[in-house]
Amino acid sequence: MNAVQYIYWTVFICWFRALLMGRRSDHTREELRALFISEGHAHLAQAGLAKFSGREVAKRVGYSVGTISNLFGSVDGLIVAINSRSFEVWAQVLRDRLESAGEDRIAALVDGYFAFAKESPELWSAIYAHRLPEGLDLPEEDKDRRAGLTQIVEDEIRTVLPAGTDADLVRLARSLVAVVHGHCSFVVSGSFALLEEPEPHAAALARVRESLAAHGYRAEDFRSELGLGDSENRGSL
Amino acid sequence: MNAVQYIYWTVFICWFRALLMGRRSDHTREELRALFISEGHAHLAQAGLAKFSGREVAKRVGYSVGTISNLFGSVDGLIVAINSRSFEVWAQVLRDRLESAGEDRIAALVDGYFAFAKESPELWSAIYAHRLPEGLDLPEEDKDRRAGLTQIVEDEIRTVLPAGTDADLVRLARSLVAVVHGHCSFVVSGSFALLEEPEPHAAALARVRESLAAHGYRAEDFRSELGLGDSENRGSL
DNA sequence: CCGATTAATGAACGCTGTTCAATATATTTA
DNA sequence: TAAATATATTGAACAGCGTTCATTAATCGG
């Protein structure tokens, strides 16, 4: 390719991009938000919320400090967006676990809850450590994105319990999320209470089963018999 | 008191303090630590961990910025000390509740757990939001001060369950703390999961009772009968 | 009374998030 | 085509943060 062709090509690219995006920048506003969220996610996972720096994220993306304020209102806004993304990743972990689960889907849920927290402790604890400054509260869009996680649990609890009043079922499901959350929180923060507990997530599962049992859940119906592998057991149903 | 008496008195005070404390400052090192912790506690309760400022605390106490580093190693050290103090206050809340409780001491425990968190949400969440920088971990002294809280719960659980293996009992007690903690955490952070739950602490208590029941606890034995006041009931035992 | 010791200081440093006048580019209008 | 308008992006300036450490000031041991 000679010099003239190169110039033509470059001019064409510029024109095409301008036509397509109607913007003067390299990215649309949404593309840019996605870039910041993606890079911010990586930075948060590595540095943790305490050492999270909006400036650092901007530097990595290759934009200037002020851009975060333009896109997200403030660094808090960026963190909210990053955390909502974490919720989506987390929900996907749960769905994956459910898909490859045997009959014991309750155990799969608990496993999935812990799996994300243990794999990305900084992302997980940032979700709960971050609090919006007084006055501001979570945008409706983010609430929706985050509700997906509890929805998954509610659906499974509904399946596993005998037919009853749905209103109480939703509340029970969310309470059980809190049960697992409590154990997970102690594990991730290395808290005093569960330091010597060898299998915290087994404890969480036990508590969940005990509460479910009190509402008519019979573990035997959903769990592989002792001595039988999951695959064999699945085939026999 | 005339002027001469006043001067004598002042001189005596100075001499006595110098004799007693062997220090050149107004306070011993421990007194000074206590001052910073006390003032820091007030500041943390008001501002929250995110806006907590060591400089601000130093200013309020009337000492300079560097003093925190001298006394606590770093601002993180100060926060650790403040949080340990919070644990002690919290444990006292539990003891008070137990003292004035009727037969239903389990309910009193759950109430006490929530009471501190709802009364001082910033102090409560600072306990769990604060994480020491990598490498450092909690001084042994602080671990001891914090363990008191779980100890109280363990003692009560032991009382309420039929005699069994003590090893499992300790683990169960701590797991139940996690159950309550999970609900409390969602309430304080205003999390999605319990937003519509009208009585989160009732839900926590219900989960605890269900798990205890699975281990031989019979609520009826420790709860007032319907229609009977606590005081009457207590007299009858 | 005089060095040695040590509590306390606070300016300096490098970091943070936020603001906003200035700039550069795209779009519309004349 | 040229000028005017609109807007995405910049980055210096600012106030506040935690940490460091040479300096100061006060007490102690001899």
Image: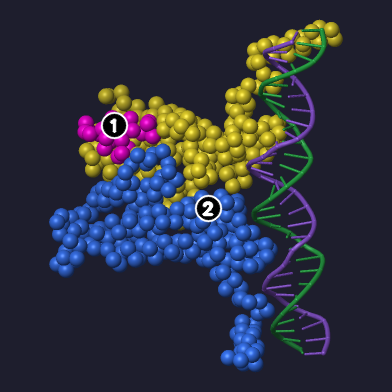
Chain colours: A yellow, B blue, C purple, D green
Identify the mark at residue B48; answer none if there is no mark: 2
Specify whether disc 2 shares its chain with disc 1. Answer: no
Task: Give the quarter of the image for residue B26.
Answer: bottom right
Task: Give the quarter of the image for residue A59.
Answer: top right
Identify the mark at residue A158; answer none if there is no mark: 1
Q: Nearer the viewer, residue B152 or D25?
A: D25
Q: Is residue B71 above or below residue A208?
A: below
Q: Chain of mark 2?
A: B
Q: 10 Å neighbourhood of mark 1: few (<14), some, or many (≥20)?
A: some
Q: Amino acid at mark 2?
A: Gly
Instruction: Please tell me whether residue A152 belongs to the stretch shown in magenta.
Output: yes
Q: Residue at x 32, y 44 (%)?
A: B198
Residue B77 placement (x, y as % from top left): 59, 60
The magenta stretch is: A150-173
Residue A31 placement (x, y as % from top left): 61, 23
Rounded to the nearest angstrom, the CA distance separating label 2 from label 1 is: 39 Å
Q: 10 Å neighbourhood of mark 2: few (<14), some, or many (≥20)?
A: many
Q: Residue at x 61, y 31 (%)?
A: A71
Residue B191 placement (x, y as % from top left): 42, 41
The quadrant of the image that shows the N terminus of chain B is bottom right
Task: Give the quarter of the image for residue A144.
Answer: top left
Q: Amino acid at mark 1?
A: Arg
Residue B211 visible? The answer is no
Q: Secondary structure at mark 1?
A: helix
Residue B87 placement (x, y as % from top left): 45, 61
How many labels were placed on the picture?
2
Q: Is residue B133 left or right of residue B92?
A: right
